[in-house]
Amino acid sequence: MCHERVTGASLPPVARAWYAPLGVIAHTDKTFDQELGLLRERLVAMAERASAQLSAAMRALTERSDEVARQVIADDATIDRDESEIDELAMTILATRHPVASDLRFITMALKFVVDVERIGDLAAGVARRALELNRLPPLEHRQDLTQLAVLVQRNLQVALDAFVRKDAGLATEVIRADAQIDHLNASLFAELLAHVATDPSTVTRVLPLTSVCRYLERAGDHVKNVAEEVIYISSATNVKHRAIAAAGS
């Protein structure tokens, strides 16, 4: 395939937002560019859908809404379908275009990205299922910290998505650092919930589903962190997985 070196000034604004930070080679094959653009759009839409699912699942829990919980569970099939269709698109591009350099990194990242986002969707559905259980039991106090945990995860997901759109490795690094705060709050909340059982064993049927929600949110945070690591990889060709990054404020 023919390629030509271009400068940022010669690209339209949307293309500059993607290509300029990476210094990549623009393709004369417009169809290839359109395919890559479609792949990016599908990834963003899937991540936004997963974020909305997580928000709705927490609403089902805090508002004790069976209707919202059931809708979250039903809508998980859409995210599963997203994963399958994006996988197929990415594999088709790999097979027909034989991309190299930054394009190859982006497409291989996409195959990992969809796995993490699909898992976030699954975890949101898990929260919704626990909501259905808890909605049939007397409410347990101290759910505010649980909501705070969910807010931190959702905020980090939005920052990771922004980092992806902007190809901003620095912003993605902040997502990784912020994950430590999610882990800390999860551990604190988990201990608080177990303390309920220690002081009042009758609360165990309510505490156990809530500890599951904690675990689901913490795991969702881990998948957001994975997305941020993948953004760093496509932005700077640097693999930061399994590397320690200092937490924010440390």
Image (spheres, rainbow, N blue to C red):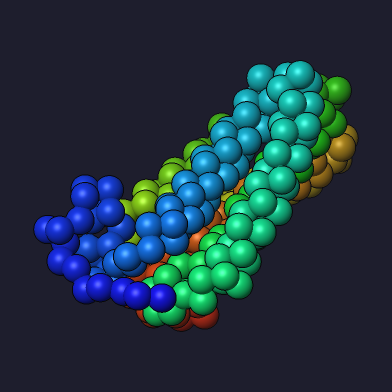
Which quadrant, please, contains the C terminus? bottom left
Question: Is residue 196 depicted above or below 24 in this figure?
Answer: above
Residue 182 % position (x, y) = 51, 53
**At 48% across and 50% down in the image, what residue appears?**
38
Q: Is residue 214 visible?
A: no
Classify residue 133 by image quadrant: top right
Viewer-side residue, 71 vs 11: 11
Question: Is residue 28 depicted above or below 198 in this figure?
Answer: below
Viewer-side residue, 206 vs 168: 168
Q: Is residue 192 left or right of residue 3?
A: right
| Total marks in image | 0
Classify residue 147 by image quadrant: top right
Residue 46 % position (x, y) = 57, 45
Residue 89 % position (x, y) = 60, 58
Which quadrant, please, contains the N terminus? bottom left
**At 15% across and 58% down in the image, what residue appears?**
10
Q: Is residue 171 left or right of residue 64?
A: left
Residue 120 % position (x, y) = 64, 50
Viewer-side residue, 193 vs 131: 131
Q: Is residue 171 left or right of residue 109?
A: left
Q: Is residue 97 visible?
A: yes
**At 22% across and 63% down in the image, what residue appears?**
20
Question: Is residue 78 depicted above or below 105 in this figure?
Answer: above
**At 86% across and 23% down in the image, what residue appears?**
136
Classify residue 145 by image quadrant: top right
Q: Is residue 39 left or right of residue 135?
A: left
